[in-house]
Image (tube, rainbow, N blue to C red):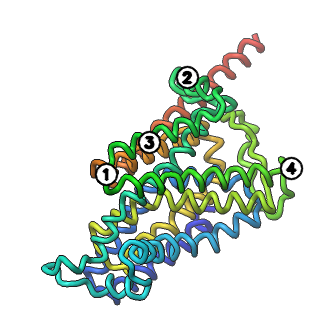
Amino acid sequence: MIVRTFALSVLITLASLVVAFVYGGWSGLFICTILGILEISLSFDNAVMNATVLERMSAFWQRIFLTIGVLIAVFGMRVLFPLVIVWATAGLNPAQALDLALNPPNPETPDNPSYATIMTEAHPQIAALGGMFLLLIFLDYAFDGEREFWGRFVEHGLARFGRIKHAAVIVALAVLLTAGAVTDAEERGTVLVAGLVGMLAYLTIQGLTSLFDTGDPAPAESADQVDTAGNPSGKGTRRTPVVVAGKAAFMLFLYLEMLDASFSFDGVVGAFAITSDPILIALGLGFIGAMFVRSLTVYLVRAGTLNEYRYLENGAHWAIGALATILLISLKTEVNEVISGLVGIAFIGAAMVSSIRANRAEQRARHDAEHADAT
């Protein structure tokens, strides 16, 4: 299963490295490799979150995610998104933005800002939109009282607070107003608008998903569709995900793409600290990084990892909360994107350790019970 799941990603990686070498020589090969490694190593929490959504989708929509979804992730977020940002903020059309990226101006001419400079200056809007979208994901999880809790205190307390109607929206709006208040005056309006757009996108997608979700499982379409919640060995206690198709699955697909985009914001902007060449960014972040993230997502679903490690989903949501917090903090203070990746890995690692301990404790309790019955 590992070979089948990752074979295409490996082939595309090798091809991308060859193209990077032909395009930019040894320097291009090195930069492409660094970008790919960074994207993969810092996106494990993204793959876990993707897997929690993907396991609810029918086999047909899983294939859509692996085909059309990949094109959106590679070309949409890693190629077109930076061009659109430059077009929207600098008044350049996409062709002019691409020309600016490939032919940077003389750094001694401040009246002609570079492609990387324009992208960096657009960071407040990007961070506010992505940060508020991710924050609502975390808050909806944190305030959900009908799930398995990780730990004894924090998550129980958050779930009790979640009994307040619209608690997630109330907290998110309070956070956005606070972020706007501490942001520089000239950026305050754009930050507030971008944050509201992020909230609107999340609430719209979630609302339409609930509208189209009838709660009826979709019929199995192939052997690749795996119900990861069924667990005869007794490991894990996650709720059985309801597999959906049709309009509900389409809305989940849109949600996945927005989720991937939100995770990618800091990585795409951070890539400009290494290079402003859109070709190398597309090869490293897109063809290498995004492909491996998607392969890892599929592997987590098909291997039943989310069910075996019962707190993995919890850890991924806390990683999302940390990333949202870092994005919003970056409105005032610069935060290295490596920090957000390491925090996410720390939460995922802690969740896996907790899951292993819980499984062992459950196995010991079962063994003791069986021994007591035998005597």
Closest to the camera, between mark 3 and mark 4, is: 3
CB atoms of marks 3 and 1 within 8 Å: no
What amino acid does circle 3 point to?
Answer: Leu
Mark 2 surroundings: few (<14), some (14-19) or many (≥20) residues within 10 A = few
* Residue to which mark 4 is pinned: 216
Q: Give the mark nearest the N terminus, 3 or 1.
A: 3
Task: Give the alpha-carbon distance from disc 1 to disc 4, as whole Å.
Answer: 50 Å
What amino acid does circle 4 point to?
Answer: Asp
Task: Give the alpha-carbon distance from disc 3 to disc 4, as whole Å.
Answer: 40 Å
Do we see residue 257 in this rendering?
yes
| Rendering coords of residue 180 (x, y %) | 39, 46
Which of the pair 319/348 is nearer the observer?
319
| Rendering coords of residue 375 (x, y %) | 75, 10
Q: Helix, strand, or loop for circle 1? A: helix
Q: Give the mark nearest the N terminus, 2 or 4.
A: 2
Q: In the rendering, which numbered label is found on residue 157?
A: 2
Do we see residue 348 in this rendering?
no
Q: Is residue 290 left or right of residue 360?
A: left
Which of the pair 330/196 is nearer the observer?
196
Task: Give the alpha-carbon distance from disc 2 to disc 4, as whole Å.
Answer: 32 Å
Residue 65 in which image quadrant: bottom right
* Residue to which mark 3 is pinned: 177
CB atoms of marks 1 and 4 within 8 Å: no
What residue is at 84 percent from the left and 50 percent from the top?
214
Which of the pair 302/258 is nearer the observer?
258
* Residue to which mark 1 is pinned: 185
Closest to the camera, between mark 2 and mark 4, is: 2
Quadrant into which the N terminus falls:
bottom right
